[in-house]
Image: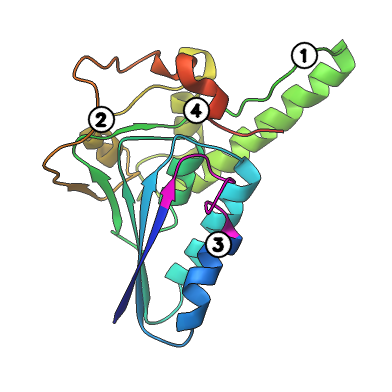
Amino acid sequence: MKEIVINIEGEIGQDNNTVEAIQKEIVPYSGMALKVIVNIRSAGGLLDEALKIYDYLHWLSELPDIVVETRCFGYTASCGTIIAQAASPNMRGISEHSLYLIHCCICDIETGNYIGLGKQRDILMLRDEHISKIYAKHSRGVLDEKAVIEIMEENEGEGYWQEPTEVISHGLADFIIKAESCDIPENYRKRGLFHGIRKIFGCKE
């Protein structure tokens, strides 16, 4: 079985973090038995691109003779956690030093009237419902869509950082990856950290 390693690092939708770049690496091996390892070190990015990557990897995972394994490292959040769900059954790993966050979709709003803002609210809620279905589908029956939304809505929609054991208990990962070291500050805060780096998280217009 041929092993291919895909690295998704930084903002999804930028550089090589696109579905086209990933397809370019895999297409030359069409027809071969493959194990595709996807290392994810991303705090988010473009939702549209993340969904395209998820769809492609999930499609691969359902083909005969192809295994897709996702591995989360560091601060994995938002669109990064969506992509992580595209693995083959029981093939979603998370580093023992990682933190994991799912949250409500966001957008940048500078001005607007009550009609436009109301429509934007409806769109964001629709996106949240769509995303919650993906997490619930892959949670091994642990979470339903309502339970996923409740996690996403914590801290006024910013969610909260989950440790690896909690991610596994929620059915969003399958195993912990032992690592010698990881670039995580010792005095991290489990909740509220999202606020300082939210500009690179979630969906963007």
Q: Earlier in the sequence, mark 4 or mark 3?
A: 3
Q: Are marks 2 and 1 in contact (CB under 8 Å)?
A: no
Q: Secondary structure at mark 4?
A: loop
| Number of the front mark, 3 or 2 | 3
Label 3 neighbour load within 10 Å: few <14, some 14-19, many 20+: few
Amino acid residing under circle 4 = His
Point out residue 32 in the picture as x, y percentages from the top left corner. Answer: 40, 86
The answer to whether 64 is drawn above or below residue 53 in the figure is below
Instruction: Reply yes or no: does residue 15 show up in magenta.
Output: yes
Q: Secondary structure at mark 3?
A: helix
Real-space Cα separation, disc 3 to disc 2, in angstroms: 30 Å
Q: Earlier in the sequence, mark 4 or mark 2?
A: 4
Magenta region: 8-19
Q: Residue furthest left?
A: 180
Tell me, for residue 21, which label it has, or none: 3
Residue at (57% x, 54% y) in the render: 18
Q: Is residue 187 left or right of residue 45?
A: left
Point out residue 72 in the picture as x, y percentages from the top left corner. Answer: 32, 45
Residue at (73% x, 23% y) in the render: 121
| Number of the front mark, 1 or 3 | 3
The chief SS type of the magenta part is loop
Label 4 neighbour load within 10 Å: few <14, some 14-19, many 20+: many
Amino acid residing under circle 3 = Ala
Amino acid residing under circle 2 = Glu
Which residue position is annotated with label 2?
163
Q: Earlier in the sequence, mark 1 or mark 4?
A: 4
Residue at (36% x, 77% y) in the render: 34
